[in-house]
Image: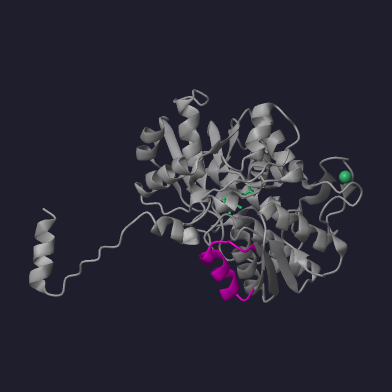
Amino acid sequence: MYFTGFRCFECGKLYRPDEDLLLCPACHNLLDATYDYDAIGRDLDRDAIAARPHGVWRWREFMPVLDDAAIVSLGEGDGPMLRCDRIAKAVGVRELWVKSDANNPTGSLKDRSITVSATKAVEFGYKILSCDSTGNKASSVAAYAARAGLDSVVFCPDDTPVPKVTQALYFGARVIRVRGHYSQINAMYRKLIHSGAVKWYDCGTDNPFRYEGKKSYAYEIAQHLGWRAPDRVVHPANGGMSIVKAWKGFGELKRIGWLEGLPKMTGVQAANCAPIAKAVLAGANIVTPVEKGPTIASALAGADPGLLGNRAVASIRESGGTALGVSDAETLEAMQLLASEGLFIEPSGAVAIAGIKRLVAEGKASPDERVVCVVTGSGFKDFDQIASQVRIPEETVGSYEELLAAAQALG
Ligand SMILES: *Cc1c(COP(=O)(O)O)cnc(C)c1O
Ligand SMILES: [Zn+2]
């Protein structure tokens, strides 16, 4: 066992690995899991890990679990890494890779982290998993609860995309629809969890175990590129934890001596809801909440990312990266570019492509870079947005003669 416990990001207090923790009990800040990296480096071989059966749990020594028998998995992680020359040309970089999480069990990146929190719920003996969510986390929590034989309760904005709510309900979750922005719901939900009024296992924004699953991005990208970091990793950012933990993952590999170089971490938000980008561009350490405007990127609705956002700003800055907000028009164009390579991606999941395009155009990223863009959710997750972009033909054919005529009309 290499997981050694937690350290508070803020006050530095240490906690044992067997404690059931959310925020730091001493100062209510975020906790970060710690590991015995010397032992990992001594005992393990990167190529042996690479040869294990696919998924997040290939990296179990880097995960905060005590009991392998508790692992709740649906085969998450190890989505395709696709070199996309057509997109590279369109955005103006030498080499562009898409890392797709659309292939995850419930169709989004959330499965990478919820597999870990569901495992901890089993280890700790909980009966009910819960979260607040813009939709993807809800469907993931519902699926992993089902897989573990547990119940789930999820809190979503009342305008959550229908496919995401449907998925959660179909897996048996109790869905509570809440009026208000995600950030307002997040504040109420966290108040409920910390009040002790319910005995649910929180898979939301305060759970320090869950986030460790997102380090797997770094491991998979590094392995795929021959243990050489790309120049830049571009990721959609809501709370920003994916960026924080991917950066942690790259740092771990570097520390063990398994990785050459480190990437510039780059966060992309919706221009109408971009508090992390605003702080990064202003040189601020603390993220100030913004007034959320309308955007098709409904999963990136975190107007007040709070402590997570501050960590994201720190990771982005430490890596030499940046952050930006993109318009809905840029996001729609990015979705089309992905479609031109056969990739069906929801608006929130596509913003990384729009982000790198703008950075190159503005001279803030070099055309010589090798870039990895993470796409984080399937087009089926926010289907109406895509359906509105096409027209299903009204005409039909009913005989061979009509079919032949229609075929010949295509030229
Ligand atoms: C949740 C989500 C994100 C953002 O992840 P954070 O770690 O909160 O920044 C990105 N894309 C999609 C599709 C999501 O559902
Ligand atoms: Zn603390």
Q: Is residue 117 above or below residue 311?
A: below
| Residue 320, image x, y percentages | 63, 27
Q: Is residue 103 above or below residue 289?
A: below
Q: Residue at x 82, y 49 (%)?
A: 6
Q: Is residue 221 above or below residue 151?
A: above
Looking at the image, which is closer to me, 25 or 291? Answer: 291
| Residue 124, image x, y percentages | 80, 67
**Picture quadrant where residue 82 is located:** top left
Q: Is residue 294 visible?
A: yes
Is 124 positioned to the left or the right of 296 in the image? right
**Picture quadrant where residue 204 is located:** bottom right
Looking at the image, which is closer to me, 355 or 341? Answer: 355
**Picture quadrant where residue 129 is located:** bottom right
Q: Is residue 253 visible?
A: no
**Is residue 124 within the magenta segment?**
no
The picture quadrant for ligand 2 comes to: top right
